[in-house]
Image (cartoon, rainbow, N blue to C red):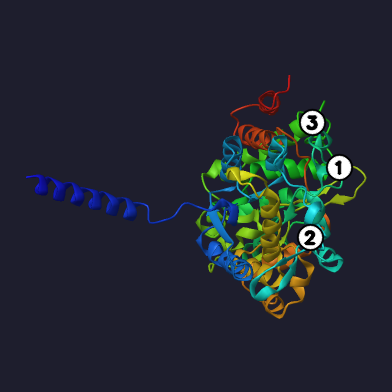
């Protein structure tokens, strides 16, 4: 009996251990040798990023990269904020400036100036030495407008967190902007050319609706971008870096503009993403005879979604606003992910070493050949000027498909890009002005009420 009991206990122990082994076949992550990277990439872009990850891991044996696609940009921000609170922050993450404005309060954002020009080397495979920092020529190769978005001076209160004005908090990964996609077939039939100003576009709407009664002349994907861009083009004021007066958007000019939009909406001239329930590209590709759009303002990075075989399309810059002095302001919003480095996550004891290795991984993501590969797949514009000199990218830019044409147009707009001040609450302002536009547009609120509520929801009085 004892032998049977002993045999049973041994068998039970073996089975228990086997279950544990199979259940735990993935060993725990060695965070001291593993770089954790958060992004919002879809499946196809994750496959491209594997190229940079594999190049990094081949150069530096024993180091790994875990790449987690968290969701959209807002989901990345929420995940990083949550992980910072738990001390489990990633080493590298996609970001927008208003995300970083929240992160810097934790003291975990790394000033990249420590590594940007560092001549220190790291020994990699085959005892080859790799310089941590960029050379002066490599730094000069960045598109300067993108690069300058990373300065701490763009963030309210940077001094209280130990940064100087020229501290570098982020580096640009790839960028996009908004473009005006148009149905060239419909415009040609009406004897019209693509509108260069908003005044011209509104003047065309009556002609377009008369010619195509079921069409909507204009679809705009992002209500927030539209509001912010109009404030920039017209000098009305959106937000300020002044901690005592952050929110400027509740002004008479913005109220008058929203009232005009409501009139155009009532005439059937406008739809937006939230109003239509989907990206307006879905309407654009239908064609004007089937209730589609003539114009669609959407991201240069989403050009593939604007492609249609039902008509000839074209792409140009977003219309500009005529100022009081007669000049036209063509400012366009800068979009697309930057990269922020965070230190000390998951209780590692080698934080400085991990920072250096994370920076070396950043360099793989910034490599011109990789930038070309990623940009051609994504439709975003590269952050390095030399990419435009690579044969593969030149061939891509000379293409006639919609992604290539969008990239080509976007590349001509670098001098028109703008960004808004980043501070704690700037992401809330963006959400609130988008809501205000939608509410005023559809008549749910008067422009005065819509903006007053938005201001109040931002913490204003």
Q: Which residue is drawn at 59% across and 62% down?
A: 63
Specify whether 277 is left or right of 422.
left
Which quadrant would residue 266 be assigned to in this image?
Answer: top right
User: Which numbered disc flags the more N-terminal residue, 1 or 2?
Assistant: 1
Check residue 413 in the rendering and tell me which mark sits there, or answer none: 2
Q: Can residue 230 be seen in this view?
A: yes
Residue 138 vs 256, above or below: the answer is: below
Check residue 164 in the rendering and tell me which mark sits there, or answer none: 1
Q: Can residue 175 be seen in this view?
A: no
Q: Which one is in front, 80 or 432?
A: 80
In the rendering, at what x and y percent does residue 84 appear? 61, 38
- SS of the residue under disc 3: loop
Task: Determine crowd level at label 1: few under 14, some 14-19, many 20+ residues with C-alpha closer than 10 A.
Answer: some
How many discs mark residues in the rendered view?
A: 3
Q: How far apart are marks 3 and 2 (CA)?
A: 26 Å
Q: Which residue is drawn at 61% across and 70% down?
A: 55
In the rendered image, the residue lying farthest to the front is 2
In the rendered image, the residue lying farthest to the left is 1
Check residue 134 in the rendering and tell me which mark sits there, or answer none: none
Q: How far apart are marks 1 and 3 (CA)?
A: 26 Å
From the viewer's perspective, is the residue at label 1 or at label 3 nearer? 1
Specify whether 375 is left or right of 255.
left
Q: Which one is in front, 118 or 124?
A: 124
User: Which numbered disc flags the more N-terminal residue, 3 or 2?
Assistant: 3
Q: Residue at x 57, y 36 (%)?
A: 86
In the rendering, at what x and y percent does residue 320 appear? 79, 51
User: Which numbered disc flags the more N-terminal residue, 1 or 3?
Assistant: 1
Q: Mark 3 points at which residue?
A: 248
Q: Which one is in front, 420 or 416?
A: 420
Q: How far apart are marks 1 and 2 (CA)?
A: 30 Å
- SS of the residue under disc 2: loop
């Amino acid at each position: 009996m004892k032998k049977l009991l002993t045999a049973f206990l041994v068998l039970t122990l073996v089975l228990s251990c086997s279950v544990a082994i199979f259940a735990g076949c993935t060993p725990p992550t060695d965070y001291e040798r593993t770089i954790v990277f958060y992004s919002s990439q879809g499946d196809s872009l994750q496959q491209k990023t594997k190229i940079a990850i594999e190049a990094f891991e081949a150069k530096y044996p024993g180091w790994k990269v875990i790449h987690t696609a968290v969701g959209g940009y807002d989901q990345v921000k929420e995940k990083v904020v949550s992980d910072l609170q738990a001390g489990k922050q990633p080493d590298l993450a996609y970001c927008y400036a208003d995300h970083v404005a929240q992160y810097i309060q934790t003291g975990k954002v790394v000033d990249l100036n420590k590594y940007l020009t560092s001549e220190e080397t790291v020994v990699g495979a085959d005892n080859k030495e790799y310089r941590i920092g960029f050379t002066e020529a490599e730094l000069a190769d960045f598109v300067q407008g993108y690069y300058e978005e990373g300065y701490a001076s763009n963030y309210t209160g940077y001094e209280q967190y130990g940064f100087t004005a020229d501290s570098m908090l982020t580096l640009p990964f790839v960028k996009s902007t908004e473009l005006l996609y148009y149905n060239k077939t419909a415009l040609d039939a009406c004897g019209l050319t693509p509108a260069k100003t908003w005044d011209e576009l509104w003047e065309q709407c009556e002609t377009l609706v008369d010619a195509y009664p079921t069409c909507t002349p204009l679809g705009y994907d992002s209500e927030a971008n539209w509001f912010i861009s109009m404030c920039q083009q017209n000098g009305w004021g959106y937000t300020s870096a002044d901690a005592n007066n952050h929110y400027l958007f509740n002004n008479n000019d913005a109220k008058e503009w929203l009232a005009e939009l409501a009139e155009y909406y009532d005439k059937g001239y406008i739809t937006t993403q939230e109003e239509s329930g989907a990206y307006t590209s879905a309407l654009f590709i239908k064609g004007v005879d089937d209730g589609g759009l003539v114009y669609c303002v959407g991201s240069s990075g989403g050009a593939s979604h604007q492609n249609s075989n039902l008509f000839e399309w074209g792409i140009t810059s977003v219309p500009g606003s005529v100022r009081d002095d007669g000049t036209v302001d063509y400012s366009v919003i800068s979009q697309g992910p930057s990269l922020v480095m965070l230190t000390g996550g998951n209780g590692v004891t080698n934080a400085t070493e991990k920072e250096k290795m994370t920076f070396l991984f950043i360099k793989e993501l910034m490599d011109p050949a990789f930038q070309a590969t990623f940009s051609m797949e994504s439709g975003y514009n590269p952050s390095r000027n030399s990419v435009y000199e690579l044969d593969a990218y030149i061939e891509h830019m000379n293409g006639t498909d919609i992604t290539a044409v969008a990239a080509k147009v976007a590349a001509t707009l670098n001098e028109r890009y703008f960004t808004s001040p980043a501070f704690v609450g700037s992401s809330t302002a963006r959400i609130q002005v988008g809501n205000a536009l939608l509410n005023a547009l559809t008549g749910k609120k008067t422009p005065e009420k819509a903006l007053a509520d938005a201001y109040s929801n931002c913490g204003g009085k």
